[in-house]
Amino acid sequence: MEFEENKDEEIEQQYTEEDYVDIYSKRAILWFSILFDVIFGGVLLIINLRNAGYKKAAIQVLFFSIFYYILTVFVISVSGIRVDAATLKKASTGVQLNATEIKTLLSLAGLTLILKIAGGLVLTQYFFKRYFPDDDYYPKPIWRAVMISLLISMLAGYILPFL
């Protein structure tokens, strides 16, 4: 008769330190989706999936991230929230905005934030949980990903408008 303790020890002995991969945590993926964009959170999840050997799932996440980005742009464009260039220029130079301009900017920011949170939750609560159901992974440091994301965001914000 075998005890349950022996079965647990056998299972633990099957896996070594080399069997575990460092992956970005659910929290990192969610916050990257919120602070940068769902595509950035999707890229972190794609890196996780590829490191764990789920190449087909990585392609699914890539397609979801691109589709969700396009959907977000579409939803914002049909929402009726219009911010003109003069308002953005006034806001960036520190000039006092009137109530209508503030309401428009806050409406756009709120809608964008809600869409980013929803996309991040899909990435973490559906895709991440599906392929990494247990919390038995080593979290990967995010500093390199933060620096790359900041660099890409700055390039997109400062160079692309001039093209």
Image (cartoon, rainbow, N blue to C red):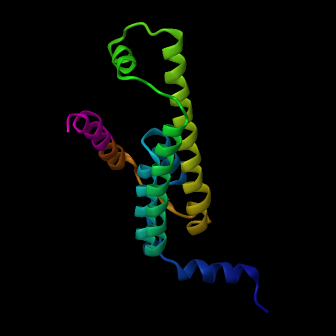
84 part of magenta stretch: no
| Of the pair 79 and 44, the residue shown nearer to us | 79
| Of the pair 106 and 52, the residue shown nearer to us | 106
Residue 135 appears in the picture as rendered: no
Give left or right: position of 42 versus 6.
Answer: left
Q: Residue furthest bottom?
A: 1
Q: Which residues are magenta?
A: 150-163
Residue 10 appears in the picture as rendered: yes
Give left or right: position of 35 versus 156.
Answer: right
154 part of magenta stretch: yes
Work out which quarter of the rendered image holds the C terminus and state it. top left
Residue 83 placement (x, y as % from top left): 44, 25
Classified by dominant secondary structure, the portion drawn in magenta counts as helix
The residue under the point 53% across, 14% down is: 100
Where, by quadrant of the figure, is residue 85 drawn? top left
Give left or right: position of 114 versus 7.
Answer: left
